[in-house]
Amino acid sequence: TAVIPLGGNIVTEDIRQGCSVLRSQAELLKTRFGSALADENKENEVICVPGLKGREPKEISVKNLAYIIQARMEEIIEHVYYEIKSSGYENKLIGGIVIT
């Protein structure tokens, strides 16, 4: 058993910073439009996020959103693989693993 201190809240924060949106908007982007496979998304597909305090709405590229999520997911998977390797179970996981 291992604990990797990375998860959904960190992905939301990455989106907040990467897209310059509010945390609530970042969470909505993640849950409604999020994907960890950037290459599966079209270049021209965008999401319109309402502007703040009379500002213009902001367009977020679905592909760029996926790149942000994909980068963090790759980091999490690297941590998981390291823990598996360190535990000595790397070649013994016939049934797979469960990540929660």
Image (cartoon, rainbow, N blue to C red):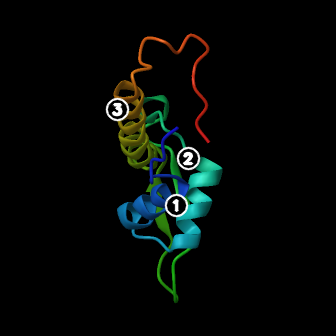
User: Foreground: 89 or 95?
Assistant: 89
Q: Which amino acid does the dot numbered 2 rest on? A: Gly
Q: In the image, which is nearer the foreground, mark 2 or mark 3?
A: 3
Amino acid type indicated by mark 1: Asn
Amino acid type, callout 3: Tyr
Q: Label 3: how many residues lie within 10 Å, few (<14), some (14-19) or many (20+)?
A: few
Dividing the picture into quadrants, the one containing residue 96 is top right
Judging depth in this view, the residue of 56 and 16 nearest the camera is 16
Instruction: Give the mark nearest the N terminus, 3 or 1.
Output: 1
- Where's residue 84, x and y in %? 42, 28
Residue with the mark numbered 2: 34
Q: Residue furthest right?
A: 32
Q: How far apart, in angstroms, are the residues tagged by discs 2 and 3?
A: 26 Å
**Closer to us: mark 3 or mark 1?**
3
Q: Residues within 10 Å of mark 2 (few under 14, many from 20)?
A: many
Q: Residue at x 43, y 11 (%)?
A: 91
Which numbered disc, 2 or 3, marks the residue that appears first in the sequence? 2
In the picture, the disc for residue 82 is 3
Determine whether 2 is above or below 46 in the image: above
Identify the residue under disc 1.
9
Q: Give me the residue at 39% from left, 69% from top.
A: 20
What is the CA distance from the residue labelled 3 to the residue labelled 1? 22 Å
Query: In this rendering, is residue 80 above or below 4?
Result: above
From this view, report whether residue 73 is shown above or below residue 10.
above
